[in-house]
Image: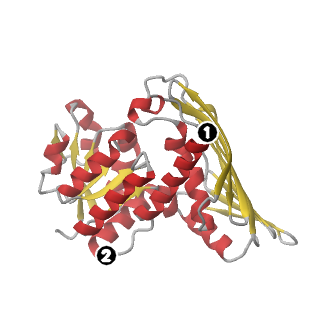
Amino acid sequence: MTGHVRWGVLGASKFAREQMAPAIHLASGGTLAALATSAAEKAAPFQEINPDLTVHLDYDALLADPEVDAVYIPLPNHLHAEMSKKAIAAGKHVLCEKPMTMQAGEFDALIALRDQSGLVVAEAYMIVHHPQWQRAHYLVEDGAIGELQEVRGFFAYNNAADPGNIRNKPGTGGGGIPDIGVYTYGATRFISGQEPLEILHADVRFEDGVDTYAEVIAQFEGFTAHLVNSMRMQPFQEMTFHGSEGVLRLTAPFNPLVYDAARIELHQPGLGLRVERYPGANHYVNQVEAFNASVLDGQDFPNPLEFSKGTQAMIDMVFAKAGRPG
């Protein structure tokens, strides 16, 4: 391998075009080398980032390209596990959008392939790479809020006017929980270091086979989590960690630079309110740089597949409690 990671992108999605391709270009340790898309006209915005970009008209051609070391997979959810396995078989490192699988048990095969191949294989769970979340993790672990007693999380947007969106289609693994529940659930696990013991309540509402609203109460050891996600509400996001001696509130916890500025508010008795701001921090760039360092230097990737499997297991628990139609 060269002294940098040569990236290929499987699919010219809007998210890849607007967020991840620029992040791959900006991140140290790698370069945007190739794109696979069946619609050649979609390559133009990617070629603006790298005029020397190699464009393949099918995914298999990119996977066979010896000038590609790693692939980023932003395809519809139902294709994630299948294409990750194909990429590993082709000898490529893999960074795949979440959810990487549709059931927790599917992670076992990916973990085995990762271990057998020695490749870096991970889910693109970008928040753990943001300094806002790294600081929050440290504060809670360091006892800044005492014993964690309650977590409240909210992440919503409204795509009701876009019925053709893959998130509104059951056949492509759509739904609000796979799309954004992964953040409120995973963030709770990341900060607490715990797994849910039981789903106490799950009010999940479905439209045409996909969940569009989910209110979940989960019991963890020593605390409860009240988490709400929706694809039919005014955009809003917030995470709050309430302890015996303080409260930690994260604004724009999932889409900083888009929804609002990333900020931590720490409320402590006698100390008032302390606010920490993180202007300009780009967790997509940080994520790619961490991945490049893992490929090139063997550094541990902050979000291993085992963590992603745990979040999917919690999603499975929620659907089991609520009852998924069909």
**Circle number at residue 322:** 1
SS for callout 1:
helix
Asked if the residues shown at circle 1 and circle 2 are in contact, with their CB atoms under 8 angstroms apart, the answer is no
Question: Compared to 145, does 82 lie above or below?
Answer: above
- According to the picture, the residue beneath numbered tag 2 turns out to be 298
SS for callout 2:
loop
The mark closer to the camera, 1 or 2, is 1
Give residue 148's position: percent from left, percent from top.
73, 67
Give residue 194's position: percent from left, percent from top.
60, 66
Closer to the camera, 237 or 96? 96
Residue lying at 83% horizontally and 71% vertically, measured from the top left: 271
**Cα–Cα gap, marks 1 and 2:** 41 Å
Residue lying at 65% horizontally and 55% vertically, measured from the top left: 198
Closer to the camera, 107 or 122? 107
* Left or right: 237, with 296 as reference point: right
**Three-letter residue code for mark 2:** Gly
Residue 134 image-quadrant placement: bottom right
**Three-letter residue code for mark 1:** Ala
Question: Compared to 55, does 300 lie above or below?
Answer: below
Give residue 1's position: percent from left, percent from top.
16, 68
Is residue 254 in view from this perspective? Answer: no
Is residue 4 in view from this perspective? Answer: yes
- Within 10 Å of disc 2 (Cα), the crowding (few <14, some 14-19, many 20+) is few
* Left or right: 228, with 146 as reference point: left
